[in-house]
Amino acid sequence: MVEKQRYTRREFLRHSAVTAGTLALSGAAVPFAHAQGSDAMRVGLIGCGGRGTGAAANCVQSSPGVKIVALADAFADRLQTAKDQFKVPDNRCFVGLEAYKDLLALDDINLVILATPPGFRPPQLTEAVRRGKNIFMEKPVGVCPAGIKMVIEAAEQAAEKQLAIVAGTQRRHELPYVETMKRIHDGAIGEIVSAQCYWNQGALWVNQRQPNQGDVEWQIRNWLYFTWLSGDHIVEQHVHNLDVINWAFQDVQPESVHGQGGRQWRTAPDCGNIYDHFGVEFFYPGDVRTISMCRQIEGTSHNVSERVVGTKGVSNCNGVIEGENPWQYNGPRPDPYVQEHADLIRSIRDAKPLNEGKRVAESTLCAIMGRESAYACRQFKRIWFLNRCELNLLPDEGLKLSDSRPVAAVAIPGQYQLAGL
């Protein structure tokens, strides 16, 4: 079994920040610092798509004294929408694959939102930390072991510089989850003996290729469907559920993985090279196993959830415990997409910066392990994958939208080779 750990001071501070933010959102009196001088949050948004503009709006809503003051995106049309929404002047809008560097060079920005496709996250996070910015970054935070190592290193450097990093795994800031996990960690369901998690849904959008569109531009505009950009949907979406399971295990990581999957329903060329379903088994210390399932197939049942089973009970991790110590959450439910920003900004203003970088990198690594195990239909250990796997999908230096980039072949189990074996 996984050895039960104590509720740490860091977890207590994080929980306290969540509670304080909830009071603020519910209208209760909370001693927010006045947003002037060093308390003003001048925010730069890198990646102006739907999730990026949504995160920026959540950030502005979360706390007083927050303003979006600069934008960067690979595409002028995507940037224009955010420019109109946040009233950002032309001289603080930057376009192109290297535009993030121009934004990060602005000295008056003290917080950046990183919301480009996940394949770009490691180098952009590294540059943001180098420039001394506090960071909100969307999940997942990489698509390969090389990128995950970059993120962990950047998170360590951020800690040394006393910079905050909060990730878009919003369940960590969602009160029903927070209160349930507190009880699970305090022993309400006993020792965990198994777990299950799911992200099963229908199809998502597809952007058809336009005439005269270069390979790189088309793939970035259709980024969900290319492993080098999204990591496949097990990484891009299912990381949420895997992160919850890691949280239940108090961030003890699985020791090995064995997966399978395929591409049977979504086979059109405009759907890139990703799978449409995965089934993965993660082996935690003590041979405690998690069954993980995710799919994007139209006409199938919908299930996005988590479940942990202990020696004294069962929990959905989200407000319900059944068994010897039954309990149900009945407290406030502030929007977690707003709450994560409130917690981030409070931690900056209180000079107690949250740093979720390593934790979200480890959960992302679990999802990448599941993908690679399914692609190859092989079981392997986490320690090998992180330290010896040679897979590197990081974008090339000087990449251009007009560049030629053939779509990588769809992985065929039995033929796909794990890099480094």
Image: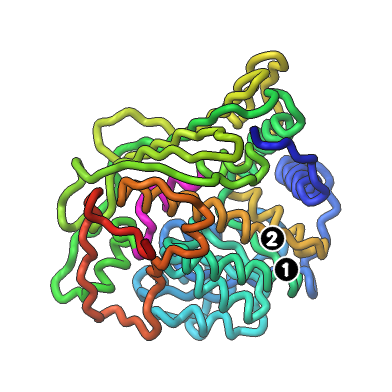
Q: Position of residue 378 (x, y in %)?
A: 35, 47
Q: Residue at x 53, y 30 (%)?
A: 195
Q: Earlier in the sequence, mark 1 or mark 2?
A: 1
Query: Counting other residues with Cα less than 10 Å from the Cα at mark 2, is it few (<14), some (14-19), or many (20 or more)?
Result: many
Measured along the vertical axis of the image, is residue 60 above or below residue 240?
below
How far is disc 1 from disc 2 in space, using C-alphas?
Answer: 7 Å
Front residue of 22/392: it is 392
Kind of residue sitting beneath label 1: Ala
Q: To which residue does mark 2 refer?
A: 355
279 left or right of 175? left
- Name the colour scheme: rainbow
Q: To which residue does mark 1 refer?
A: 159
339 left or right of 396? right
Front residue of 95/195: it is 195
Front residue of 43/393: it is 393
Q: Main secondary structure of the magenta part?
A: helix
Question: Does the rendering let one see residue 211?
Answer: yes
Q: Position of residue 1 (x, y in %)?
A: 64, 32
Residue 236 shown in magenta: yes
Q: Residue at x 63, y 42 (%)?
A: 247
Front residue of 30/257: it is 257
Residues in magenta? 228-240
Q: Residue at x 76, y 58 (%)?
A: 346
